[in-house]
């Protein structure tokens, strides 16, 4: 299957990055190069694009798509390690960073990846297929309490306890190997009258995917690391698809911006508040109505932009 991913909020990201022709930019979630190709098109030979992805198949597809561009560096790694990556490349600061935290269409649709609740696929869900933790291991070895907590927190699923209980009861008799088995358990756990908000397995699958790929826990610190890696006037653009992701990005931006805590009647600041930059997006940018109609996966997308001073 061809690696394809329709980039969301593409024009908004390109405008937000304010690309300099001779600048250094990082696409920390390169995917199929949907955003990357529009960045590199705007760079001269002196400019540089660093593409990071933990999915080797994504990097392979990006290399093919960007084969005519010689100023691209491809890195198989996690964007959480951006400081170490730039150190290895002997790059101190960059002009812009983009993170698109969504799952690609390829990852959702490719049968062996197990991201989708449609069909009968192996329970995997790893973005980086070299890591050990898989969805199969989460589903079959996590305790009932652990499963209930992660399904509730990461999936915002109100029937999380019933789903976790039924998963544990099922696996007493048989190992859960496929997405189809897991979907059947989830469907039996949610009353039919409550299965009217999309596919009943959607939230649970999202939760397990987030757990397998550790998408939430390091995000707050990753955002702060990205800001530290920016040159003055450098821009950080982050697209989120989940309320927990958006909250982590928003809070990291607010902390980086800094806030004076002095009483309002003081003539000047004495609390020593420091700022690393400014938040460009007072409210997150969302996809236009037209984009949402063309690409349903853009409906939950939110873009927040920060500029380093």
Image: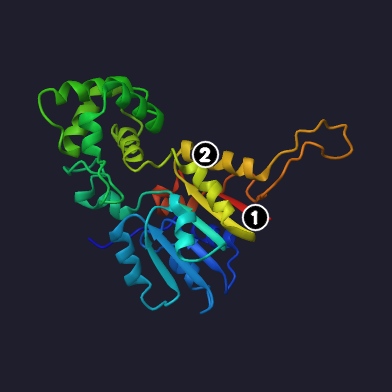
Q: Secondary structure at mark 1?
A: strand
> Which residue, given by chain and number where applicable, does mark 2 sit on?
248
From the viewer's perspective, tell me whether residue 285 is left or right of residue 294: right
**For the point 64% across and 55% down, which residue is it?**
308
User: Is disc 1 surrounded by few (<14), some (14 to 19) or many (20+) residues within 10 Å?
Assistant: many
N-term mark: 2 or 1: 2
Residue 194, position as x, y percentages in the image? 33, 24
Query: What residue appears at the point 37 percent right and 41 percent down from the top-left corner?
Result: 214
Residue found at x 31% / y 50%: 127
Against 46, is 73 above or below? above
- Residue at (15, 37) in percent of width and height: 177
Quadrant into which the C terminus falls:
bottom right
Residue 303 in view, yes or no: no
Which quarter of the picture shows residue 24? bottom right
Circle on res. 39: none
As helix, strand or loop, the secondary structure at mark 2 comes to helix
- Locate residue 243, reporting x and y percent: 48, 36
Q: Quadrant of residue 196?
A: top left
> Camera-side residue: 156 or 71?
71
Q: Nearer the viewer, residue 275 or 243?
A: 275
Q: Quadrant of the N terminus?
A: bottom left
Do labels 2 and 1 touch, CB within 8 Å? no
Residue 211 in the image, given as x and y percentages of width and height = 34, 37
Q: CA distance from mark 2 to mark 1?
A: 18 Å
Residue underneath mark 1: 308
């Amino acid at each position: 299957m061809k690696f394809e991913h329709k980039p969301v909020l593409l024009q908004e990201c390109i405008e937000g990055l304010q690309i300099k022709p001779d600048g250094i930019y990082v696409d920390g979630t390169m995917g199929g190069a949907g955003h990357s190709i529009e960045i590199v098109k705007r760079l001269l030979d002196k400019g540089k694009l660093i593409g990071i992805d933990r999915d080797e198949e994504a990097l392979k597809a990006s290399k093919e798509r960007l084969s005519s561009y010689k100023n691209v560096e491809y890195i198989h790694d996690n964007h959480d390690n951006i400081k170490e990556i730039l150190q290895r490349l002997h790059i101190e600061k960059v002009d812009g960073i983009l993170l698109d935290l969504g799952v690609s269409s390829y990852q959702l649709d490719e049968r062996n990846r197990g991201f989708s609740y449609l069909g009968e696929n192996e329970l995997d869900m790893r973005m980086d297929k070299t890591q050990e933790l898989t969805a199969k291991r989460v589903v079959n070895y996590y305790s009932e309490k652990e499963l209930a907590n992660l399904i509730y927190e990461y999936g915002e699923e109100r029937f999380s306890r019933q789903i976790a209980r039924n998963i544990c009861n099922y696996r007493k008799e048989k190992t859960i190997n496929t997405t189809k088995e897991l979907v059947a358990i989830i469907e039996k756990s949610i009353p039919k009258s409550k299965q009217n908000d999309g596919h009943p397995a959607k939230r649970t699958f999202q939760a397990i995917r987030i757990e397998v790929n550790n998408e939430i826990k390091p995000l707050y610190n990753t955002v702060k690391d990205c800001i530290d890696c920016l040159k003055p006037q450098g821009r950080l653009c982050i697209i989120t698809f989940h309320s927990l992701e958006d909250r982590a990005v928003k809070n990291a931006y607010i902390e980086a911006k800094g806030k004076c805590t002095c009483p309002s009647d003081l003539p000047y600041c004495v609390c020593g508040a420091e700022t690393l930059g400014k938040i460009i997006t007072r409210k997150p940018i969302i996809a236009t109505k037209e984009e949402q109609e063309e690409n349903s996966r853009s409906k939950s997308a939110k873009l927040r932009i920060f500029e380093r001073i």
